[in-house]
Amino acid sequence: MSDFNAGMPGDQSDFLANVRGQIIDIFHIPTGQSIQFKAFVTSFSDKYESEWNQEDVYGRMDPIQTFKKTSRKISLEWEVVSASVAEAKTNLARCTDLFNMLYPTYDSAGAASASSITGGPLFRLRFMNLLQDVTAAPAAGSTATAEEAGLIGSMSGFTYEPDFDQGVFAEGVGTIYPQTIKLSCDYTVNHTHKLGWTPEKTKRQERFPYGDAGELGAGPASAAAGTGTTPSSTVDAPTDAEVEAALEEMGVPGFGT
């Protein structure tokens, strides 16, 4: 589970992140570091695009089409909101670490030559059941980290946009911490599991892309069908008693489940 504002009075967003697992989790494969944000998502799109080679032939009205590939690209926008100057500092530090992760890994400290690059900035990205590796992700109602069940892919970049209309926290001379930061990214997914259809006209991966969603009157895909595994480190959904205990610990009164 997440640990936002641990040891400090919490709010409703802490409850949703820590107890309900409503977070954006970004795992940097080269360093093994993870950065998490509360899921104040403002825009989400998941684009699947099939590419074909087309060849025009004399006397034929339609081109001859040969299938090449289907790619998946995700666009995600969210807001990083701070309820205090301490949280604003933490959020700015998270952004700083995240943007550094867009740069490659070098074979020695301080190297600046392109020839010394040893690895590109690959990621695992998870946003609950909407962004997950379904071959490793837990069943509906459970949580897993991006390291365990995130989609492998590459970022084309991030856009960092402080919302100055929401105000800032000022500290000392010449230093401010935005109360709200707008972040956006485009993510190209690397497919790491079997997709498509078998000769028997069954899906090669039943749970792709959003997990156990059910289909056309059928129940959720069963584990016995060989559609995926559940990591041993996943966490089951909290019970009502556990939710109430978490709320009391975070000092969030009167927030219903």
Image: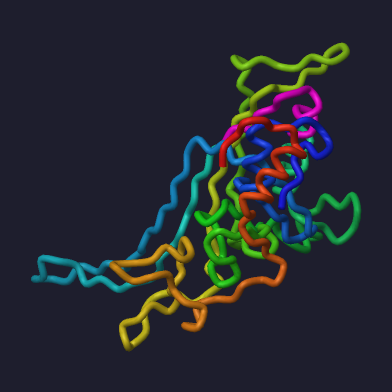
Which stretch appears magenta? 78-91
- In x, y percent, where is residue 132? 56, 60
Question: Number of labelled discs?
Answer: 0
- Examine the rendered structure and indicate whether residue 86 appears above or below residue 59: above
Res 247 quadrant in image: top right
| Of residues 5 and 111, the one drawn nearer to the viewer in this rendering | 5
| Of residues 169 and 106, the one drawn nearer to the viewer in this rendering | 169
Q: Which residue is drawn at 53% across and 46% down?
A: 186
- Most extreme residue toward the right, as rendered? 109
- In x, y percent, where is residue 207? 46, 69
- In x, y percent, where is residue 140? 52, 62
- Examine the rendered structure and indicate whether residue 83 appears above or below residue 119: above
Q: Residue at x 59, y 14 (%)?
A: 165
- In x, y percent, where is residue 104? 75, 54
- Most extreme residue toward the top, as rendered? 173
As for residue 89 lying within the magenta part, the answer is: yes
As for residue 219 lying within the magenta part, the answer is: no
Q: Which residue is drawn at 69% across and 32% down?
A: 252
Q: Residue at x 34, y 67 (%)?
A: 215
Q: Which quadrant would the C terminus be assigned to in this image?
A: top right
| Of residues 134 and 70, the one drawn nearer to the viewer in this rendering | 134
- Examine the rendered structure and indicate whether residue 169 appears above or below residue 216: above
Name the side, left or right, on which 53 lies relative to 139: left
| Of residues 175 and 256, the one drawn nearer to the viewer in this rendering | 256
Res 168 quadrant in image: top right
